[in-house]
Amino acid sequence: MIRRHTLGGRTYTFDGLVDLMAKATPVRSGDQLAGCAAESDAERAAAAWALADEPLATFLQEQVVPYESDEVTRLIVDAHDAEAFAPVAHLTVGGFRDWLLATSTRPDAAATLTTVAPGLTPEMVAAVSKLMRNQDLVLVAQAARVTSAFRTTIGLPGRIATRLQPNHPTDDPAGIAAATLDGLLMGSGDAVIGINPATDSPQATARLLHLLDDLRQRFDIPMQSCVLSHVTTTVDLIEQGAPVDLVFQSVAGTEGANASFGVDVRMLLEANEAGRSLGRGTVGDQVMYLETGQGSALSAGAHLGTGGRPVDQQTLETRAYGLARALDPLLVNTVVGFIGPEYLYDGKQIVRAGLEDHFCGKLLGLPMGVDVCYTNHAEADSDDMDTLLTLLGVAGAAFVIAVPGADDVMLGYQSLSFHDALYVRQVLGLRPAPEFEAWLAGLGMADGQGRVLPVDLDASPLLSIASGS
Amino acid sequence: MSIGDAGSPDVTASDPWSGLRRTTQARIGLGRAGSSLPTRRELEFRAAHAAARDAVHEPLDVDALVPGLDALGLGPTRRVRSLAEGRGEYLRRPDLGRRPASLDGLDAGGDADVAVVLADGLSPRAVAEHGVALVTALVDALGTGLRVAAPVVATQARVALGDHVGAALGVQTLLVVIGERPGLSVADSLGIYLTHDPRPGRTDAERNCISNIHPPDGLGYAAAARVAAALVDGSRRLGRSGVALKDSSALDDATAEALDTGP
């Protein structure tokens, strides 16, 4: 269906929902690369007006990626909860923005948002985010509450957790142990200690799983570990009896993009069951760890939707959260600046995308974290990461990723540092996950407010983690 | 402690982290100024990021490369640029970096077997520092059995631009030597991409890559050239490059291992 809007004496025409959504999206290089971005700021503004008038119910009738040809769409549509949708069913996208902002100021905001979440589709949430300013994305996300648990509890108000990411270019156990020690001494690791392996070899993955599990048991750390291998590698290792806490997979918002990752919905649902069957959690049983990022579908050439039109990358990203929701994960994070400047060109685009992804995931009911990051060929630097981290801290992000000195020496990009995590906890009064904080305090590494204290390495009982003794 | 002394790895001789630093290049044990990074460590990071950014953005000085390439005796060096106008467009539009603005001056009249394209990619600095030496080593390693076309230097170029060049020259084997995305610790690394029967539309799965070439710390010129020559030989016997070549027995063990340890 053609949509029209007249602005400043000029009438703009949008050829269907896919075109309208793309043109209403704040500017980003990936949509320009895909050829679906608005041609001018005025066209973008006109599209936002037209999108604001669209009834939310439209998204139940008109799909941006066809139901017949895409299993992610089928999952989203078939799982839709009409009863939960009822309180907002009469609203337009613009009216929904007003409803979210008003709801977020009320004392029962968290409960209301949780109740309505199963009634929202990813496309509805993506649409409303396109009408929202950064402060709106922060305000509503802060009002929403999502918690998850395995050996620590993630997402509690007043807390922010970290994934300690001790990557090494050759998976050297001594090097990984040294980076892990550095992170633990800085109070990181309460979301997960998660290694990106340099190879997908099952033997190497198993070796790293044992390294982390031995460490956990030796020092009685309330933590979960993960080696971010392909889901099929992890499921095989579960069958072989390896100590698998979390099952990782990268996911995207179309069937084709997931196929490029070598996964489908059934495989992911089975992997979730396999992970849960081990019963290794203590305070919860959520085992899936999922990563996403705007641009992954375009990068795989699997970004076309209804009518063969390119779907904007933010809408496709939000559809990945629709898939994630079906897996009831412990952790989900967007790897926001990793993919490069052809998708998110500069710090402004990365900051905006990070806030959108966090808002959309959290509103859909996911324990949402962000890998606040950039590459050396993007127009971004540490100042941009500071801005995004601070905003995410205010917005109530469940966790962020941290590496030694913000420099991932395996993946060749810059994430946050352990220091950055201490910074955001300090300025916003945020604490680690409660189980992990208690462990830190027990070793004299945290004070009564959950602040991580400086440690003398030579005097720390954790020193033997890295010295091999 | 002087913050100006940013060159040495250890804050003091008695730094308890110094032993652990031998196990990883990761920036461990940086110390704390309250919650934050101490000044010296902040400045070290800033300098590394600046070097990486400069490596991306400084344009390739093609004139400086030509004498060294001409000296190979393969014929006068040819130049190609992509459709990307400037660095900003190159970074935003990888599709334009894959297509040549013009192939004038390249013709299929030659009888070469192999073409070597030296492309700026994401690190013109890597090409400036290692390009001529690596191409020289490649020509040596290929030996006298194969005819190598006069070198081509491509600017604002991605790997797939070479497919157009290779097709225009009518060669069966294409080697693209290209600057790799700079990391914080290494900003001058080159990669070599082999494509058998190059033509527009080839995918990355149809190529073989040797990466991390940046002596003295990374792979050396001669070692990289030996692996490339073995791949060229294997691909010409197998009649294809890419995953099929890596998995085939057309490679000796050393070459297969060198590829397996690449990123």
Image (spheres, grey):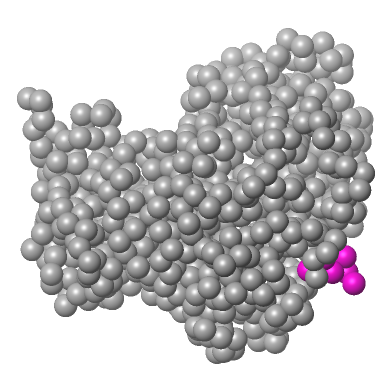
Q: Which residues are magenta?
A: A462-469
Residue A160 falls within the magenta-colored stretch: no
Depth check: B128 or A279 in front? A279
Q: Could you tell me what secondary structure mostly forms the magenta stretch?
A: helix
Furthest residue toward front: A448
Is residue B166 toward the left or the right of residue B19 in the image?
left
Is residue A375 toward the left or the right of residue A302 in the image?
right
Depth check: A235 or A127 in front? A127
The residue depicted at 71 percent of the width and 72 percent of the height is: A443
Name the spot of residue A447 as percent of width and height, x first: 61, 65
Depth check: A75 or B241 in front? A75
Rendered view: A372 above or below B221: below
Rendered view: A200 above or below B161: below
Residue A464 falls within the magenta-colored stretch: yes
Mark count: 0
Name the spot of residue A161 as percent of width and height, x first: 53, 63
Is residue A171 toward the left or the right of residue B170 in the image?
right
Name the spot of residue A303 as percent of width and height, x first: 39, 51
Depth check: B242 or A190 in front? A190
Name the spot of residue A129 as percent of width and height, x first: 28, 50
Instruction: Answer whether residue B142 is visible to the viewer in this image.
Output: no
The residue depicted at 10 percent of the width and 37 percent of the height is: A5
The residue depicted at 56 percent of the width and 35 percent of the height is: A381
Quadrant of the frame with the C terminus of chain A: bottom right
Instruction: Answer whether residue B157 is visible to the viewer in this image.
Output: yes
The residue depicted at 23 percent of the width and 52 percent of the height is: A128
In terms of image quadrants, where is residue A198? bottom right
